[in-house]
Amino acid sequence: MREELMTDAAEAAIRAAGLRVTDSRRAVYDALLAHPHATADAVHDTVRDVVASTSLQSVYNALGDFAAAGLVRRIEPAGHPMMFELRVDDNHHHLICTSCGAVTDVDCATGHAPCLIPDDAHGYRVAVAEVTYWGLCASCAALQTSIPEEPTPTGRTS
């Protein structure tokens, strides 16, 4: 029953975005419902279990179509593969663990989008601000006795 609900949600969202509903697109959407912040490879692994004939290129095509239609958001953290999420209706940011790579959504802390206004925009009209917080998730922090002084997006200390 839960799988039917996911597929119904997928079909409705894909149609609402003005895209043609296919088994592959429905499976990609369902994979993102089940696994937020997924890479294309991770989505493909999930989709293959549902629609075995779906190629990695088909997954990339669906994700690209979804992004262009505003159905998914691309996340491109430094030193990590591009990820995709369905949470597109707000201005939120991400916490990324420098040890295990876990990604967690965090709401914008300072109000309306873009929530960070540069001191000097150099003539740009800022529409979006992306913030990525890097650190250790609770599980990884519990395993380590000390946090590196200056973690970098690659997980190395400077």
Image (cartoon, rainbow, N blue to C red):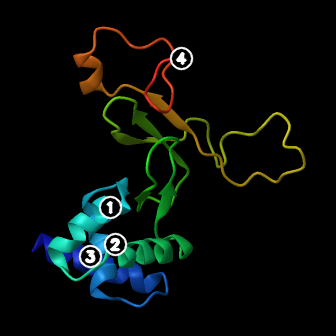
Q: Which residue is mark 2?
A: 56
Label 4 to label 3: alpha-carbon separation? 42 Å
Query: Which comes before the other along the chain, label 4 or label 3?
Result: 3
Where disc 3 sits, the SS reads: helix
Q: Residue furthest right?
A: 123
Mark 2 near mark 1, Cβ–Cβ under 8 Å?
Answer: yes
> x, y percentage for residue 74?
50, 59
Residue type at tag 1: Asp
Where disc 4 sits, the SS reads: loop
Query: On residue 114, which mark appears?
Result: none
Determine which quarter of the picture holds residue 140.
top left
Q: Which residue is mark 4?
A: 158
Crowd class of label 4 (few under 14; some 14 to 19; many from 20; radius 10 Å): few
Residue type at tag 3: Ala
Q: Residue at x 24, y 60 (%)?
A: 34
> x, y percentage for residue 13?
39, 78
Query: Which comes before the other along the chain, label 3 or label 2?
Result: 3
Crowd class of label 2 (few under 14; some 14 to 19; many from 20; radius 10 Å): some
Label 2 to label 1: alpha-carbon separation? 7 Å
Q: Which residue is mark 3?
A: 27
Where disc 2 sits, the SS reads: helix
Report whether 108 appears left or right of 156: right
Query: Which comes before the other along the chain, label 2 or label 4?
Result: 2
